[in-house]
Image (cartoon, rainbow, N blue to C red):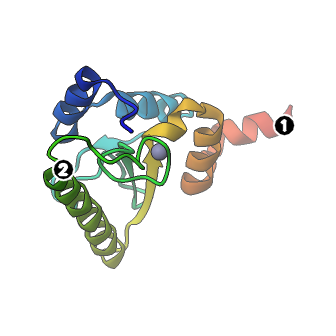
Amino acid sequence: MDVLTPQQRSANMAAIKGKNTKPEISLRSIIHRLGYRYRLHRKDLPGKPDIVFPSRKKVIFVHGCYWHMHDCRFGNVIPDTRTEFWQTKRTGNVARDERHVKELKALGWDCLVVWACSLRDPKTVVREVRRFLGFRGTRWKRRKRI
Ligand SMILES: [Zn+2]
């Protein structure tokens, strides 16, 4: 069963190739509020990671659950029309994602994948991002003293 209406699905499909998707923007604002500074879409890195932290050598990918086949209710969906075509495309995405992570690791970069569905619960994402990036020096110290 498809959890999205045909309209939502086509908006979703349009978003796959594009940058600045809604989940990406909301993750960026979370990261910004946490006080981390980042760069976007470094074209010289495998997979053009969505959010890049050059000094930490860390990158974050924001993956749409449907297109990157997350094991969740949005990802575990089989399209009703042109099934084979879309399934091939999706499994191709997953294979490419794995390759990019391997390439990045080989170059000494740490990767985190944030799934679009997890952004429905920002608290969890905040915890995940902090654990991945490490606490930001000044703000953390200031908070500890209180
Ligand atoms: Zn998901």
Q: Secondary structure at mark 2?
A: helix
Q: Residue at x 32, y 69 (%)?
A: 98
| Residue 33 visible in the current orientation | yes
Q: Amino acid at mark 2?
A: Trp
Q: Nearer the viewer, residue 15 or 43?
A: 15
* Lower position in the chain sequence, tag 2 or tag 1: 2
Q: Which mark is in front, 2 or 1?
A: 2
Q: Nearer the viewer, residue 108 or 141?
A: 108
- Asked if 139 appears above or below 101 in the picture, the reply is above
- Asked if 144 appears above or below 5 in the picture, the reply is below
Report, in whole angstroms, how far the alpha carbon at label 2 lies from the one at label 1.
53 Å
* Left or right placement of residue 112 versus residue 141 in this view: left
* Left or right placement of residue 15 versus residue 22 in this view: left
The answer to whether the residue bearing label 1 lies less than 8 angstroms from the nearest atom of ligand 1 is no
Q: Residue at x 26, y 68 (%)?
A: 95
| Residue 19 visible in the current orientation | no
* Left or right placement of residue 98 versus residue 48 in this view: right
Contact between labelled residues 1 and 2, with CB atoms less than 8 Å apart: no
Q: Secondary structure at mark 1?
A: helix
- Asked if 11 appears above or below 125 in the picture, the reply is above
Q: Residue at x 40, y 61 (%)?
A: 57
Q: Quadrant of the C terminus?
A: top right
Q: Quadrant of the N terminus?
A: top left
Residue 76: where, in percent of width, then height?
42, 50
Mark linked to residue 90 = none
Q: Residue at x 24, y 25 (%)?
A: 6
Mark linked to residue 86 = 2
Q: Amino acid at mark 1?
A: Arg
Residue 55: where, in percent of width, then height?
40, 56
Return the residue at label 1. Answer: 145
